[in-house]
Amino acid sequence: MITIAMPKGRIFEEAVELLRKAEYRLPPEFEESRKLIIDVPEEEMRFILAKPMDVVTYVEHGVADLGIAGKDVMLEEERDVYEILDLKISKCHLAVAGLPNGKVNGVAPRVATKYPNVASSYFREQGEQVEIIKLNGSIELAPLIGLADRIVDIVSTGRTLKENGLVELERIAEITSRLIVNPVSYRMKDTKIDEMMERLSRVIGDE
């Protein structure tokens, strides 16, 4: 049995589609299930559904052999896992955004984000001193209510920024979802993991 941690939502749907294309026999009602643990005995696979930020934790601690995580999470968390395949799904990017004519605090502009480590590193590389404010949701709200001068967040279509009167100012990194593995699992279950990498690589290469 191989255990895979997957994030709920868009990444989950795209990953399931990828696994099916790689000829893994997942039940038709797989996406509709409300369960947090789903066993697929015919493939000797178990899936754990989790929040995106928790997937890496499950893999690092070995309760999941493999995981599917966005590169944004990998950059932010810096955990002891191996990144073994770029699945090229859920493409988006990390960006700095703000109000089009927003005045920036000259001393230490405030930046609101779910990604404090990524944001700190980025602005340090730019030689800019900022104050980081960590938020967990609705990051776009921060400049509108005067909590922050700028935000660092994931941008997919840019629609959410536009609807809230914000503009993208700088692009930090391109993001896709990655297949990650626990180092011990990679040694113990290498045959099954290598087979999965091969099957997925073929599908990704065909697209």
Image (cartoon, rainbow, N blue to C red):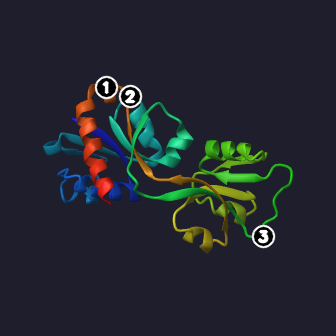
Neighbour class for label 1 at 10 Å: few (<14), some, many (≥20)?
A: few
Vertical comparison of 91 with 78: above or below: below
Neighbour class for label 2 at 10 Å: few (<14), some, many (≥20)?
A: some
Provide the residue designation for mark 2.
183
Q: Residue at x 72, y 47 (%)?
A: 123
Q: Name which residue type carries label 1.
A: Arg
The numbered dot on residue 80 is: none
Q: CA distance from mark 2 to mark 1?
A: 7 Å
Q: Name which residue type carries label 2.
A: Pro
Q: Secondary structure at mark 2?
A: helix
The numbered dot on residue 187 is: 1
Q: CA distance from mark 3 to mark 1?
A: 54 Å
Q: Residue at x 83, y 56 (%)?
A: 105
Q: Residue at x 35, y 25 (%)?
A: 184
Provide the residue designation for mark 3.
101
Give the mark nearer the N terminus: 3 vs 1: 3
